[in-house]
Image (cartoon, grey):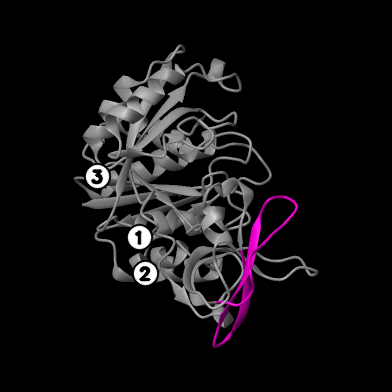
Amino acid sequence: MQLHVGLDDTDSIKSGCTTYITSCLIEVLHKKGYTNFLDYPNLIRLNPNIPWKTRGNGATCLRLNLKAKDDCRDVEDVVLDFIEKNFERDSETNPGIAFLEGDVPIVLKNFSSEALWRVVDVDEALRIAGNIKCKVYWFNDVKGIVGALAAIGETLDGDHTYEVLTYRKIENRGKPRRIDLNSVWKMDKVTKPLTYNNIDYETGRILITPRGGDPVLYGIRGESFNIVKYAMRLIKVYEPIERWTIFRSNQGTDAHLRKICKICEAKPYSSLILEGYVSSQPSITIGGHVIFKLKDETGEIYCAAYEPTGNFRNIIKNLIVGDRVRVYGGLRKAPPITPKTVNLEE
């Protein structure tokens, strides 16, 4: 019997990590004798433009093969008890947990696809969960169930990647991460292009280490299980690693950038693709951002390449009025005195 366990929003803006909770939960289930996993733990990055997201906006899913119905009940009890005791206590943390028995239905796969690029209503999530007999639980606010359901629904049948995440011992969290930076450059040279996003070559900044006080020491993303495991062995660290886990993921696949919209259809907080003509000469703001207008037969909208995007801005600067372009990005809700603007990614 298959049991899918979806988790989301167990962390806070400042600390915690849903992947860490998931890694610890795997250990707890192993100790209970539940060792027959159907897949690597799944890490699903959802719509990055959701304003109430935590840092990475990632949800996770564990997929198990169990012997009996009673095992499902026991796993559910273990998971709920563990999450309740270990999620980050914060007013903005709203853990959601979902349990689905059997095959993942197409309606849930479609729901997950929607959650990757737009705002999904909680009532819609509850309705679908009820229709497919998926049990959902939450602490604090109910909205965490959206990500939990979406993680179950994204079975990663298409393009996918892997990420190995290493975690710090609790006494080191909040302190500077002690990693040999030269070993990161060496790892990148040896493993690229099979690993990616290790280093920002324009600035020299190391990208595998997060900046906050969360439990992650570093994470390496790549095209296969074997390459990220090999890359991990090349990294030298000067602090103990508590644990590490390899996730299968939709990261690096542009899964959130699949919906082609007309400008009149563009809604706040969505990830979208727009096609049209450049209708104003690109201009540079005081902060170094590059702005231009895009027009199609339904309307006109601002597009912006912000200063942190580096050389990408140079491409935008060279556009001229009349150029036909396809843009990829996210639409944040604009304040009343400023127009809607697409934050460009590609």
Image point 25% across, 58% down: which residue? 157
Please give left or right for residue 229 compared with residue 43 in the image: left
Badge 2 amino acid: Asn
Q: Position of residue 136 (x, y in %)?
A: 46, 56
Q: Is residue 209 above or below residue 107?
A: above
Q: Magenta stretch: residue 301 in it?
A: yes
Image point 47% across, 48% down: which residue? 58
Q: Which mark is residue 153?
A: 1
Please give left or right for residue 173 compared with residue 155 in the image: right
231 or 182, which is in the foreground? 182
131 or 324, which is in the foreground? 324
72 or 229, which is in the foreground? 229
Residue wearing tag 2: 110
Image point 63% across, 49% down: which residue? 307
**Magenta-colored span:** 278-303
Helix or strand or loop: what does disc 2 sit on? Answer: helix
Q: CA distance from mark 1 to mark 3?
A: 14 Å
Q: Of the residues under marks 1 and 3, which one precedes in the sequence?
A: 3
Helix or strand or loop: what does disc 1 sit on? Answer: helix
Badge 3 amino acid: Asp
Q: Is residue 132 visible?
A: no
Residue wearing tag 3: 39
Badge 1 amino acid: Gly
Q: Position of residue 260 (x, y in %)?
A: 44, 74
Q: Is residue 105 above or below residue 79?
A: below
Q: Of the residues under marks 2 and 1, which one precedes in the sequence?
A: 2
Q: Position of residue 118 (x, y in %)?
A: 51, 67
Image quadrant where residue 77 sits: top left
* Local crowd size for mark 3, using a 10 Å CA cut-off: few (<14), some (14–19), many (≥20): some
